[in-house]
Amino acid sequence: MRSRWMLFGISLAAAGFAQPVLAQDAVADKVIQQAAKENRSYAYLDKIVNGIGARLTASMADHQACKWAVEEFNAMGLENVQMQKAGEFPVMFNRGPWSGSMVAPEKMSLEFSTPAWTAGTKGAVTADAVMQPKSVEGLNAEDYAGKWILTENQRRGRRGRGNRGSAEERREADKKRREVQNFLNEAGVAGFIRSSGSEYIRSGGNYRIRWDNLPTIPQIIMVDDHWKAIQARIDKGQKVSLKFDIRNHFSKGPSPFYNVVADIPGSDKADEYVIVGGHIDSWDSATGTVDDGIGSAVAMGAAQILAAAGVKPRRTIRFMLWSGEEQGLLGSRAYVEQNPDLMEKISAVFNYDGGPNPIAGIDCTPAFHADFEKVFASVATLDEKLPFSIRVREGGMTAGGSDHVSFFRKGVPAFFWTQRGPLDFRHGLHTQFDTFDLASEEYTNHNGLVAALAAIGTANLDTMLSRDNLAARRGGRGGQQANGRTMGIYLEDVSVSGVVPNSVAAKAGVQEGDTILKVDGNAVGNRADLLRAIRAGGPEKVVVVKRAGKEMKLNFVWEAEKKKAAKKETRSDNL
């Protein structure tokens, strides 16, 4: 180890930098020693999720968490500490306590939640439960007024599986469902109860509500076993009475949400940046531990370790806690849009949003593999029980689905850690089980140290990380791959939020902000419709987009597929 760093030290001196031969080793050792004395990553997590709790974007708890983080960063002695407004919602939503039970024909506590930005009860409401009717024919509103409505899940078969009926039959079924929904809403039911389909209650909610048209009827999602227990009694003809007390509250907006920023200033390259971050918002059916209280705690822990160690990075290390991630990377997207000139000055973004297990590696391209070997040399030897590896992506890296994507779309090297271990991330991800007991003190503190070493190592490199061949042409969620036919765009539903350079979409003239309306004359109402339309038929498509209020026709051509088809046709003609 020392001999390798001796060589790096000699090359630095030969390049004219007045640094000690073992400068990089010495800095890493100093950071590691400081972390051994005091590492507050897990303590920060405790405060975030147990002291503050769930942090729904633009809620009072979200604001409280941001203000607390500012206080902590200031106490560390960081500079440029501030809350930067990233956006606002028209209505503030805050969730209070909720409880529910079956009171007849027997007593039974019920496990459930409600989506964010939906109505609660006005005090405890006890009423009979009935099944939702299948049509409105012959119904009397009085039979449903004030009652809890058990709603059966509409399970539509996956593409190619089961019989979904004809398009006309599906439209007719949808029409009947809307008629029933409207009838029950007008009848004044107590609320709707649907099954989660499993033991998990998936968190979610739509913030696009207006103060002059607030939701008024509670929408309850109940664990499957409890929902079925109620259904079974109703099916037997028993009178079932349920009691719910759900304290959801709305406040007139607009309600802002913020990004938290704090810097350790650089020295000779202070106008260049390394960013370490995680999102501070969470869904609110639990305490937001693995998603992403740990990410915020790791970023803050890295800042505390580096500040206490007194290191002086060459580049500015910026710590960022983004809000609005769960609603579509709103905080990080706003930061990128607010700071377009900064993007070319960012060497790397290290984003943590992968749950409670220890960091086990990171991806890179061949262009900066050697740099990462230097940066992570000390990480690889931290703990033999927690190995670390660098994976080289020959064809470029893919984006993923967290806040680093906002930077990646602008050509910034942005990273999502590889994590492996025994802890169950999926158990808590967007569920009612996302609580403090899922975290590990050992792993959280370890990850704070890894983030600190990544930040200082990258900040002290001679050059910024190379952007050559950064993005893969294809790649899961980042490249919108559809059975091998890739458009090269990032989507928010059917709105284009980014375009990959030199991709099919870029060559066709697609621009960020376009909304895709039609493919080959067929309307696309959502992302699934769009992918099906792109996947179908030949390798040339006429795509209609809406841009600045005007519709435009663009030609998508998959040249390689087109040539392959032409060769196949030629061979057929020669038979």
Image: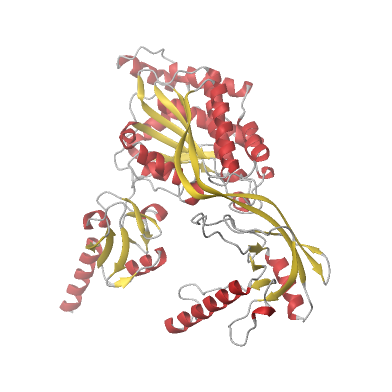
The colour scheme applied to this rendered structure is secondary structure
Q: Position of residue 344 (x, y in %)?
A: 31, 34
Q: Does residue 226 lie above or below 255 as drawn? A: below
Q: Is residue 421 visible?
A: no
- Residue at 30%, 56% (x, y): give it: 514
Q: Position of residue 168 (x, y in %)?
A: 43, 84
Location of residue 191 by image quarter: bottom right
Q: Residue furthest bottom?
A: 138
- Residue at 37%, 40% (x, y): give it: 336
Viewer-closest of 128 and 319: 128
Viewer-closest of 6 and 141: 141
Compared across the picture, whether 514 is left or right of 139 comes to: left
Q: Position of residue 518 (x, y in %)?
A: 30, 68
Q: Which residue lies furthest to the right in this view?
A: 106
Viewer-closest of 138 and 221: 138
Task: Count the marks.
Answer: 0
